[in-house]
Amino acid sequence: MGARPDTDHREQMIDDLARRLDSWNLSTPAIAFLEAHKPLSFFASQTLLAFQPLLTLFLGEASIGEYATLLEDPGSVERVICRLEELREHETPLG
């Protein structure tokens, strides 16, 4: 796998990923998926690489490897979950 992103870049990637998922209304399913698969985060990161051709449509080709590196670390996965929860808390209810 590639070099780990520095702390600022990692936080920016986490924020970008969480915001994309939130904009697609996928916060709740993403949190459930990430919580359930935290112990398998390394394998999930490898799956990102396997599905790279399809995922480039959503994340951009250059960033797939960076996201795979990010998600192989359980601490980063937890940070993504926390960021998604923060974004959900700040949503304004409809109505």
Image (cartoon, rainbow, N blue to C red):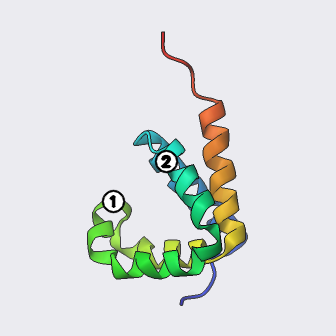
> Against 22, is 11 above or below?
below
Which residue is depicted at the point 34% across and 73% down?
Answer: 61
The numbered mark, 1 or 2, whose residue comes first in the sequence reads 2
Badge number at residue 94? none
Residue found farthest to the front: 36
Local SS, label 2? helix
> Against 4, is 92 above or below?
above
Question: 44 or 84, which is in the foreground?
Answer: 44
Determine the CA span between mark 1 and mark 2.
17 Å
Q: Mark 1 or 2, which is nearer the eye?
A: 2
Which residue is depicted at the point 65% across and 42% down?
Answer: 85
Q: How many residues crowd around disc 1 within 10 Å: few (fewer than 14), some, or many (20 or more)? A: few
Q: In this image, 32 relative to 25: left or right?
A: right
What kind of residue is marked 1? Phe
What kind of residue is marked 2? Pro
Local SS, label 1? helix
Quadrant of res 49? bottom left
Which residue is depicted at the point 58% across and 28% down?
Answer: 91
Q: Position of residue 79 (x, y in %)?
A: 69, 58
Q: Position of residue 36 (x, y in %)?
A: 59, 61
Badge number at residue 58? 1
Question: 42 or 24, which is in the foreground?
Answer: 42
Q: In this image, 89 relative to 53: left or right?
A: right
The tally of labels here is: 2
Which residue is depicted at the point 64% across and 30% down?
Answer: 90
Q: Position of residue 65 (x, y in %)?
A: 46, 79
Badge number at residue 29? 2
Quadrant of res 37? bottom right
Determine contact: label 1, label 2, CB under 8 Å: no
